[in-house]
Image (cartoon, rainbow, N blue to C red):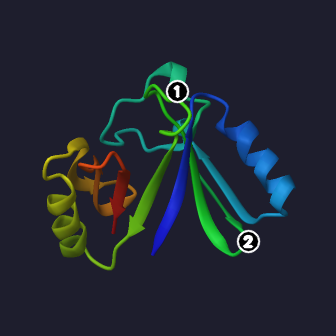
């Protein structure tokens, strides 16, 4: 399954609430960086604690993901596609193909939220998060 992900720079929670109202969204869930385990596998600064690490809700039948990012965003690069794979092997296969002539954002490996995860921008400028 592929699901869109929207990235914000500090106002993600506000955007989630807005889209929830606009689309009568269902199944809303929000996790903040402060909710991560004590050793999440990546740096969480004090400035990040109240930001959205992962939010999700169903909009018009499609699961949509949301998060705050510390990356610089501009109109057009705030969206990436999350690919929920059936296995770690599938994540690895797709990751290695997408990273060819692309840019690695997060190296492939296990995370506290996934048995295998990696993020890349492919050669065409599309950002992908691969999750098993």
Image location (x, y in percent) of residue 121:
30, 46
Q: What residue sits 53% from the left and 59% below the top?
A: 4
Instruction: Give me the disc on residue 67.
Output: none
Residue that carries the numbered disc 2 in the rendered image = 60
Pointer 1 with pointer 2, Cβ within 8 A? no
User: Which one is in front, 38 or 19?
Assistant: 19
Height in image: 17 above or below 91? above
User: Which one is in front, 89 or 73?
Assistant: 73
Q: What residue sits 86% from the left and 54% below the top?
A: 21
Image location (x, y in percent) of residue 117:
29, 57
Please report whichever mark, 1 or 2, sits nearer to the chain's N-terminal start. Answer: 1
Image location (x, y in percent) of residue 66:
58, 49
How far apart in space, not on screen, are marks 1 and 2 (Cα)? 30 Å
Residue at the outermost top position? 47
In-image side of 16 versus 76 (left or right): right
User: Which one is in front, 107 or 110?
Assistant: 107
In-image side of 78 versus 119 (left or right): right
In this figure, what is the number of numbered marks? 2
Residue that carries the numbered disc 1 in the rendered image = 48
Q: Give SS at disc 1.
A: helix
Height in image: 54 above or below 88? above
Q: What residue sits 22% from the left and 41% below the top?
A: 103
Q: Dot 1, how many residues are within 10 Å of its Cα: few (below 14), some (14-19), or many (20+)?
A: some
Q: In which quadrant of the rendered image does the N terminus lie?
A: bottom left
Q: What residue sits 46% from the left and 27% below the top?
A: 70
Q: Give SS at disc 2.
A: loop
């Amino acid at each position: 399954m592929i699901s869109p992900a929207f990235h914000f720079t500090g106002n993600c929670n506000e955007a989630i609430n807005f889209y929830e109202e606009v689309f009568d969204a269902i199944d809303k869930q929000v996790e903040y960086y402060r909710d991560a385990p004590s050793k999440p596998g990546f740096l969480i600064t004090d400035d990040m604690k109240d930001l959205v690490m992962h939010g999700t809700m169903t909009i018009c039948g499609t699961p949509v993901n949301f998060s705050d990012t510390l990356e610089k965003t501009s109109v057009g690069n705030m969206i990436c596609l999350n690919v929920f794979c059936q296995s770690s092997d599938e994540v690895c296969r797709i990751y290695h193909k997408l990273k060819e002539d692309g840019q690695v954002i997060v190296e492939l490996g296990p995370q506290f939220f996934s048995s295998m995860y990696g993020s890349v921008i492919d050669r065409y400028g599309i950002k992908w998060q691969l999750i098993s």
